Image (cartoon, rainbow, N blue to C red):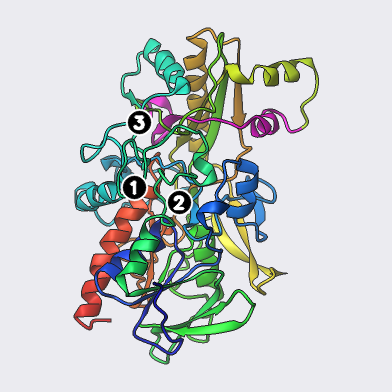
Amino acid sequence: MNKQFALTDNSVVVVIGSGAGGGVLANQLAQNGVDVVCLEAGRRLSPADVVNDETEMFGKLTWLDPRISSGQTVPGLPVWTCKTVGGTTMHWTASCPRLQEHEFRTDSLYGDIPDTNLQDWPFDLETLSPYYSLAEDRMGVTGTHNIPLLPGNNNYKVLEAGARKLGYTDIDTNHVAINSVARDGRPACVQSGFCTSGCVIQAKWSTLYTEIPQAERSGHFELRPESMVVRIGHNAQGRVDEVHYLDSEGTLRIQKARAVCVACNAVETSRLLLNSTSDRFPNGLANSSDQVGRNYMRHFIASVVGEMPGPVNLHRGAHQAGIIRDEAGHNPERGFAGGILMLTVPFAPEMFAKFLDPNGWGEDYASTLENYDHLAAMLIHGEDLAQQSNRITLHPTERDSYGLPVPIVHYEEHPNTRRMKEYALKCGKAIYRALNAKKVHAIVDMLPATHNMGTARMGNDPATSVCNPWGQTHDIANLFVCDGSLFPSVGCGNPTLTIVALALRQADYLTRQLQENIL
């Protein structure tokens, strides 16, 4: 039963967001006996709301409030995030790599790269490893804790065969938070191929199915969906003490708080902090360093599609249950810093038609679409480097339906990324050509960013970072950030496992702070 707390209850911790960071943090705090109010902008879907239809689920899951594209971002949809209970864990592919040791130390290892703002993490892989292990067990990540890997579908078999012909060896069906066997009261994957539609049978880990119900059973947790937070307030001492939000009817509510944790994904976390201005904090909360919203990073995303000699039916099977890790290391001899992952990906026919050519026409185009069942496809993503000029800002006049300034997402690709992308596409094309693909297509700069990080990064120096190693803001002791915004660097792998590990670590720290009356 969902417990209810009074708006005047100033003993609660308010967590803003219910995705990988917020949902896990809120649940772990509740399990630790801490009273939590979780405010989520989106609505709570029921099992019947989730269907195997990517187009329908796009409308149900996606954050569609206006955002302004700037620089090299997709017009109208610069980032793809979710507005629903569970956040982007409803849409994600469930790929769960750990950051590699070198990816914690980019400033120390990568050298002086012009026009970057590199910063090492304030701790190393060894420090985070126990929390990675806890996260993998909690999420049921395949290939860890004696959980079998998923079987390989045809798309994987093509990827593996081509890769091995080229001499790659670190290839398998990936560490994914999708049940390969029944676990945690949820069934095993049936390979239906609709991972990003929310997973009808709940084999894929999402906080909607796992963390939120567990938190509700604790008796220390209240979820308030359709609650759009517009600002965070503070008292005369500069401690945050209230959260202002619009409920489902558009009525302004104010929830008192002992501490506040912001877990809204990088764009909304930045917007909320920047919009919460006051005489004491004229540039927004936690922003004495002028780093809130800066250092926005995303993985470059590109796809290679091969028209193979025989049928593949790439749409059958888990989306990213196939990975090549051989190019993931830092090897500057390739002409760039950082690494690359190549993973299987399916495209629905209508999505592939759009990505292949939005204005497609003619015999050649039609022939490719007719060969849909012969397509094999991979997604390639690689490490992005921090640049101060890549940032989230607020439009001075444009307002959305909540009366909030519309966020501007500005991103310019660094030359290092361009060199990495050229190399990665060459590798991807070679894999399918090694198997005598009839045609090979490269799809670049069409997809909005789905891995958004770095806008409130951690560090030991308050002059160059927003948060300390625990996600606690330097400026305000009882204000925390708990999402990908914390990342000082992003590595080349999907960020969700790291977000969950950081949330578990933050929950331990915050619980101790509360129990010892430090906060």
The residue carrying pointer 1 sits among few (fewer than 14), some (14 to 19) or many (20 or more) residues within 10 Å by Cα, namely some
Disc 1 element: helix
Name the residue at the bottom extreme: 236
Find residue 378 and report its horizontal and vertical position in percent.
Answer: 50, 27
Q: Amino acid at mark 2?
A: Thr
Closer to viewer: mark 2 or mark 1: 2
Real-space Cα separation, disc 3 to disc 1, in angstroms: 36 Å
Task: Give the residue number, with chain letter if any, for mark 1.
Answer: 107
For residue 246, side relative to residue 223 (left or right) = right
Q: Amino acid at mark 1?
A: Asp
The residue carrying pointer 2 sits among few (fewer than 14), some (14 to 19) or many (20 or more) residues within 10 Å by Cα, namely many
Say the numbered circle drawn on residue 150: 3
Task: Give the residue number, with chain letter if any, for mark 2.
Answer: 89
- Magenta range is 330-358
N-terminal-most mark, 2 or 1:
2
| Residue 345 shown in magenta | yes
Name the residue at the right extreme: 362
Q: Would you place residue 300 above or below residue 44 in this image?
A: above
